[in-house]
Image (cartoon, helix red, strand yellow):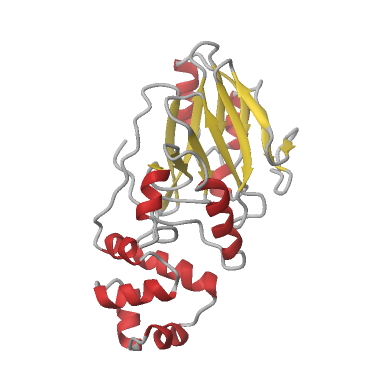
Amino acid sequence: MARLPLEDNFTDVIAKAQTGLRITDEQLATRAEISMEDLLAVKSGHLLDAVIRRIARHLKLGTNALEALAHKRFYPTAPIFSRGLTLYNTPHGEQTVNNYLIWDARSRFAAVFDTGTNAEALIDTIHAEHLDVRHIFITHTHEDHIAALPALAAACPRAEVWSSELEPVNHPGAKTFKENAHFHVGDELAIKTIFTTGHSPGLTTFFVTGLSWPVAIVGDALFSSSIGGSAEHYAEQLRNDNDKIFTLPRNTVIAPGHGPMTTLALEKLHNPFFARQ
């Protein structure tokens, strides 16, 4: 697979923070003591470092992290899983969306997280690896994450479809879980549900242990160098990310709904929404 681009550039991060904090351009220019001309130049992609840093401070973003993102100095390097976890990336309009397959090597039991917009490659892997998919977990019900659910469910008749009780998926026979529900895939893999709402009413992070590294499958709660946008529930999303994702073990691999996989340690340093500098 070709290297996935970051989901957001620095202007997207500025826009998400500004929208979430409900700060107008006029207010931001005044508070940051910059001209409207410079503000609009940065928001259109011009690399005015001093202005970017002033904007970052007044949007509660990490200044160094935002500047590095603007200059494309950072790209995450996540561990490679030789077996047991696979990322699928499918088109959605001009963008793409990720979904994931995990499996227990001994029992061949498997679970899928979201479906993307086309499940053909995923289904090919299931057949090639002789996997028995027992669970299809939904992080949230936005169309790009569940578009291929009917096709995937038909190909995996033994799989139960699960989503949050706060955001049930519209699929025949689908079940819902509460926060801190626990599931097992074979003898080795364990999954814990963590509600990381904000971007959507029931957005769920699935914390998976038993693979080479712990993995948090986060949907749109967190991207490398960004987060899922929320005009109405921005503070809730930040709080849940901070309290429930960034408190996971430091070596946790982050498997987002868009963009490349990353690690918790890298995002603590390089994600403008959470970096301290």
Residue 199 occupies quadrant: bottom right
144 or 247, nearer to the observer: 247
Image mark count: 0
| Residue found at x 54% / y 37% | 115
Horizontal side of 75 relative to 127 (left or right) equals left
Q: Relative to residue 171, is residue 84 depicted above or below?
A: above
92 or 227, nearer to the observer: 227
Q: Position of residue 269 (x, y in %)?
A: 36, 53
Q: Position of residue 264 (x, y in %)?
A: 42, 44
| Residue found at x 72% / y 38% | 177
| Residue found at x 50% / y 26% | 102
Horizontal side of 111 relative to 250 (left or right) equals right
Quadrant position of the C terminus in the picture: bottom left
Q: Relative to residue 26, is residue 45 depicted above or below?
A: above
Q: Position of residue 220 (x, y in %)?
A: 52, 50
Q: Relative to residue 253, is residue 41 depicted above or below?
A: below
| Residue found at x 65% / y 22% | 157
Horizontal side of 156 relative to 62 (left or right) equals right
Q: Position of residue 5 (x, y in %)?
A: 33, 49
Quadrant position of the N terminus in the picture: top left
